Amino acid sequence: MLLALLLAAAPSPLFADPDLAEAMGRIDPRPGAWVEYLVRAPGRDDLRVRATVLPAATGGRHWIELITASAGGIVSASRLLLRADALFPRSVERMYLMLAGQQPIEVPMDRIKLPEARIHARPPVARLGTRRVRVPAGTFAAEAMRIAGTRVWRTATVPLWGLVKARSSRQSMELVSFGTSGGHSVFPPGWDQGNGSDSARQ
């Protein structure tokens, strides 16, 4: 039952929409940087998602931690090992999941349904100029873009993806808060030294 809940929560609503995942592009993996978004989708509860860059791994890889909370207080966390040279979801090499204070568990990638990578060239980007965008985190002068069916507003002021706001037919995202330092893991100390590193492949 726990595994089913973990799989249902993974990897994050940030990447539930393939067009949005494509539009977000590569991450700027500065350790300690974090962003929090309000994610809305028709027919679903609003979600808060916080993404934090953790200390870099070796070989051009980095860890990112995603924490998701609903209005009902249900919380899940996922830790992803990403390659810096590829776009999500192709960049994910390992995934650990934790639900509501349970011990983290490693889930084999073949057990996770990720958005399918595009098999054709990346869609053209229509640059629409600078726009003032108001979101819960404040007002930003952001570059507006249209990528496939997704509208995106970005600025270098915001860490990770530079994303201030995004809207597609499937969901929308708005920046709630962010920081360039101070981000930390919510996984319990020593989680990877014992049962926390167990695999879900059983």
Image (cartoon, rainbow, N blue to C red):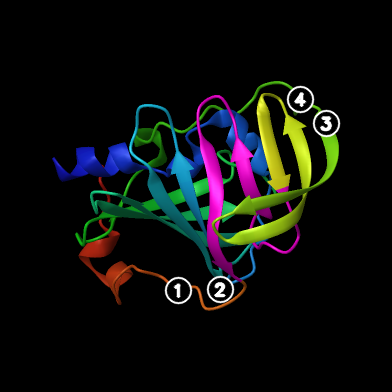
Question: Does residue 136 appear in this view?
Answer: yes
Q: Are marks 2 and 1 in contact (CB under 8 Å)?
A: yes
| Amino acid type, callout 3 | Ala
Label at residue 121: 4
Is 61 displayed left or right of 11 in the figure?
Answer: right
In depth, the one of 148 and 11 nearer the eye is 148
> Nearer the viewer's eye, disc 4 or disc 1?
1
* Among the two numbered marks 2 and 1 on one chain, the one whose residue lies closer to the N terminus: 2
Which sits earlier in the primary sequence, circle 3 or circle 1?
3
Q: Is 101 rendered above or below residue 44?
A: below
User: Nearer the N terminus, badge 4 or badge 3?
Assistant: 4
Disc number placed over residue 126 in the picture, else none: 3
Question: Which amino acid lies under the numbered mark 2 shown in the image of this protein?
Answer: Gly
Task: Residue 66: name its quadrant.
Answer: bottom left
In the image, what residue occupies the spot 47% across and 49% down? 38
Residue corresponding to mark 2: 32
Q: Residue furthest top?
A: 120
Q: Is residue 183 above or below residue 88?
A: below
For the residue pair 8 and 176, the one nearer the viewer reads as 176
Using the numbered discs, state the Cα–Cα distance from disc 4 to disc 1 in whole angstroms.
36 Å
The Cα–Cα distance between marks 2 and 1, rounded to whole angstroms, is 7 Å
Q: In the rendered structure, which segment of residues is drawn in magenta?
A: 154-179
Question: Depth-wise, is mark 2 or mark 4 nearer the camera?
Answer: 2
Rendered location of residue 64, percent (x, y): 51, 59
Q: Which sits earlier in the primary sequence, circle 2 or circle 3?
A: 2
Distance of mark 3 from mark 1, alpha carbons?
36 Å
Pointer 2 or 4: first along the chain: 2
Kindly identify the amino acid type of the residue bearing the numbered disc 4. Ala
Numbered disc 1: secondary structure: loop
Which residue is drawn at the image coordinates 23% and 68% (left, top)?
194
Q: Secondary structure at mark 2?
A: loop
To which residue does mark 1 refer?
Answer: 184
